[in-house]
């Protein structure tokens, strides 16, 4: 059978031509695919390159033991907020369209346009709310002692929207808030521009604060969006936050093919 492998972020640079269509025996698992890829890498490099990654199958997080089918799309995901990916579709991201997928009081979007925070906050408010909490993540002019010129954000869009939608819906259920809005910018961002905006509206301030904090922390750990930082003295992929244990795939524990 044949599966399509798409590496993201730093993995894209390392694997390059090793990605694409890969032939595997029927009944092959995610672990077997990782072992196949590991065998193509330079000696000593595989452990570092393929450590602490996550794997998706058809835009859903997968485990090492999951069995692959012919035609599956397998994403190799380094820790998020740390790299670049395949190009986004301008038609889908030209404006911050609602991608809530039918979830009530959930607004989700990826956009290549500037995020209009004032408009989104106003739209989130309702007469029944007693509090609106906003997280406005911006591009700063320095990182780790280096002067930042700009950032580039890209995503595994289908999967990112799905994850954002699920997080917003879970936040409403978990914290009892009325409205959850999550909008993330893609493409080139200049200093001072908003990269991510989260708005939570609730009858009570404590729930709104807790939900907003949980949403940004969860987004940074699980939503497949990566960034490339360009400094005055070079460019690097930002180190991402480790995946939660239930998502990370550890190739070192994967069984070898017979």
Image: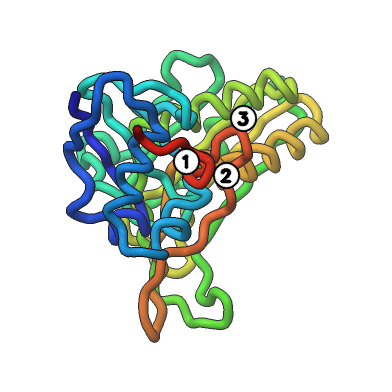
* Residue positioned 77% across, 29% down in the render: 130
Q: Which picture quadrant has residue 216?
A: top right
CB atoms of marks 1 and 3 within 8 Å: no
Q: Position of residue 78 (x, y in %)?
A: 44, 50
Q: Residues within 10 Å of mark 3 (few under 14, many from 20)?
A: some
From this view, report whether residue 177 is shown above or below residue 153: above
Residue bearing mark 3: 125
- 3D distance between C-alphas at marks 1 and 2: 7 Å
Q: Position of residue 211 (x, y in %)?
A: 70, 34
Count of residue discs: 3
Kindly tell me whether residue 183 is visible in this rendering: no
Tell which circle, 2 or 3, labels the residue nearer the N-terminal end: 3
* Residue positioned 47% across, 64% down in the render: 238
Tell which circle, 1 or 2, labels the residue nearer the N-terminal end: 1
State which mark lies toward you, 1 or 3: 1
CB atoms of marks 1 and 2 within 8 Å: yes
Residue 243, label in figure: 2
Q: Position of residue 235 (x, y in %)?
A: 37, 74
Residue 54, label in figure: 1
* Residue positioned 38% across, 21% down in the render: 67
* Residue positioned 51% across, 62% down in the render: 239
Mark 1 lies on a secondary structure that is strand
């Amino acid at each position: 059978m044949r599966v399509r492998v798409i590496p993201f972020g730093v993995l894209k640079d390392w694997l390059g031509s090793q990605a694409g269509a890969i032939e595997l025996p029927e009944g092959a698992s995610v672990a077997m695919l990782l072992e196949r890829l590991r065998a193509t890498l330079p000696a000593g490099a595989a452990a570092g390159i393929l450590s602490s990654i996550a794997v998706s199958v058809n835009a859903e997080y997968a485990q090492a033991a999951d069995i692959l089918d012919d035609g599956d799309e397998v994403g190799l995901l380094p820790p998020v907020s740390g790299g670049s990916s395949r190009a986004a579709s301008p038609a889908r991201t030209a404006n911050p369209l609602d991608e809530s997928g039918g979830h009530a009081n959930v607004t989700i979007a990826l956009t290549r346009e500037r995020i209009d925070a004032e408009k989104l906050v106003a739209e989130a408010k309702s007469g029944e709310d007693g509090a609106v909490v906003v997280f406005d993540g911006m591009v700063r002019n320095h990182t780790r002692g280096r002067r930042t010129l700009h950032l580039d954000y890209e995503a595994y869009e289908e999967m990112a929207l799905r994850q954002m939608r699920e997080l917003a819906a879970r936040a409403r259920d978990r914290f009892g808030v009325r409205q959850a809005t999550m909008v993330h910018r893609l493409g080139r961002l200049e200093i001072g521009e908003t990269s991510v905006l989260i708005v939570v509206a609730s009858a009570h301030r404590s729930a709104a604060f807790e939900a907003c904090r949980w949403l940004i922390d969860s987004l940074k750990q699980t939503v497949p969006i990566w960034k490339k930082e360009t400094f005055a003295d070079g460019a690097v992929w930002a180190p991402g936050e480790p995946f939660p244990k239930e998502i990370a795939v550890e190739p070192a524990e994967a069984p070898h093919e017979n």
